[in-house]
Image (tube, rainbow, N blue to C red):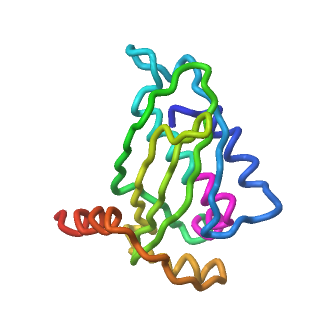
Amino acid sequence: MNLFFRFLRIFLPAWFARKRTQPLDVHVIKSAVWIGDHDPMGHMTNSRYASFTDLGMLNYIARTGFLKVFRKNGWTPIIQSEAISFHRMMRFPQKFELHTRPVGWEGSYILFEHKFISKGRTVAESRMVARLVGRRKQRVTIDMVFDGYGLHMDSPEISPQFRAMLKDLEARP
C-alpha cells in the first residue's frame, strides 16, 4: 500500500469505532492531494485514485464490523475488476472526499461505487467488483458473511454497468 500514513489515519479510527455503520451506508474519507500524489503532468496520478478506492473499501469493511467476521474466518476481499472514469483533475493541495458505498452483491462478489468529490463536484468515479476468498481458496459467499454478522439482507438491484462487469468476470477462464 503506497498510502501507509493515510491508511493508519483512516483504518485505526474505523477499527476502534464504537458505533458500527450499516452495510448500505455511504462511507466518507476526507483527504487532500499531497505533492507526492502528482504525476509529471502536475495532477494527481491515475494510480492514486485506485489506491484511495482500496482505502475506501477497507474503511467500509472496518466500520461495518465485517472485518472482524473476515479475520475470524480467514476470509479476504480481492479486487477482481475496477473501472475508473475521470471527469476533472485534482492538484496539490486540493481537498476532496471519497464516498464509498456498496451497490449490490451476488454469490462471492460485492460491488462498490466510489465517488471522488471536490468543491461540490464529482471529480472521478469508480466501479469496483471484489470477490471474497477463504483459506485454501475456499469459496465465500456474501450470505456466509451476513450469517457470521447475524444479518440477512437482499441485494439492491444491480445496475447494467455492474451486471456487464460480472458477466465479463464469469467469462474469464
Q: Nearer the viewer, residue 36 or 118?
A: 118
Q: Is residue 95 above or below residue 100?
A: above
How far across and how far down the image is residue 26, in percent?
Answer: 62, 59
Q: What residue do we see at 40% from left, 76% from top?
A: 106
Question: Quadrant where the C terminus lies?
Answer: bottom left
For residue 5, what is the image quadrant? top right
Whether residue 7 sits left or right of residue 154 in the image: it is right
Q: What residue do we see at 69% from left, 59% from top?
A: 63
For residue 4, what is the image quadrant? top right
Q: What residue do we see at 52% from left, 21% from top?
A: 91
How far across and how far down the image is residue 71, in percent?
Answer: 60, 64
> Please, which residue is most extreme toward the right here?
18
Q: Is residue 26 above or below residue 93?
A: below
Q: Is residue 85 above or below residue 72?
A: above
Q: Nearer the viewer, residue 118 or 154?
A: 118
Q: Looking at the image, how many numbered discs can be counted on the residues?
A: 0
> Please, which residue is most extreme toward the front here?
120
Whether residue 135 sits left or right of residue 69 in the image: it is left
Q: What residue do we see at 39% from left, 38% from top?
A: 86
How far across and how far down the image is residue 1, in percent?
Answer: 51, 37
Q: Is residue 168 magenta?
A: no
For residue 8, what is the image quadrant? top right
How far across and how far down the image is residue 112, in percent?
Answer: 47, 59
Give the prevailing secondary structure in the magenta stretch.
helix
Q: Is residue 98 above or below residue 48?
A: below
Q: Nearer the viewer, residue 162 or 79?
A: 162
| Numbered range of the magenta stretch | 58-70
